[in-house]
Image (cartoon, grey):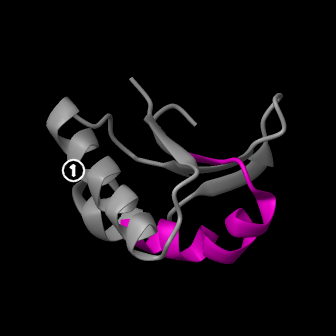
Amino acid sequence: MKNFISIIFDNKEEFDEIDNIVIEEIASSASNALLESETNYSLFESENDKSVLRVETHVKLTEAEADVVANSVANKLFDLGYENFDIEVSE
């Protein structure tokens, strides 16, 4: 994936419960970046044993767009009671 948003979780159990919620939130807040009819994503463990959900964006996000998406996803996760995660947007 060339352009993407990654959400990195410390706890695999939390990760398994919310992957679809996060994907839906990214899709709704980054709709102009997800112009294709299909959203591609991958789930994997990082080298340091963290769980990563990576969602492809079909265009490179501007800094403002990346901030909107990251804030939207973070707020959704906070609302659901999750606090141990990081969000990264490809440059």
Q: Is residue 90 visible?
A: yes
Q: Is residue 1 magenta?
A: no
In this rendering, is residue 34 above or below 85? below
Near-viewer residue (6 or 86): 86
Side of 59 where 51 appears, left or right: right
> Residue visible at 21% across and 31% down?
63
Image quadrant containing the N terminus: top right
Near-viewer residue (42 or 9): 9
Q: Is residue 38 visible?
A: no
Three-letter code, disc 1 = Val
Side of 48 where 35 appears, left or right: left
Side of 91 where 9 appears, left or right: right
Location of residue 19 in the rendering, given as x and y in whole percent from the top left corner? 62, 69
> Residue visible at 44% across and 30% down?
90
The residue most toward the top is 91
The secondary element bearing badge 1 is classed as: helix
> Residue visible at 38% across and 23% down?
91
Magenta region, residue range: 6-25
Location of residue 50 in the rendering, given as x and y in whole percent from the top left corner? 76, 42
In this rendering, is residue 24 above or below 12? below
Q: Is residue 7 magenta?
A: yes
Location of residue 87 in the rendering, given as x and y in whole percent from the top left corner? 47, 42
Image quadrant of residue 77? bottom left
Location of residue 2 in the rendering, given as x and y in whole percent from the top left corner? 51, 31
Q: On the image, numbered disc 1 is attached to which residue?
A: 68
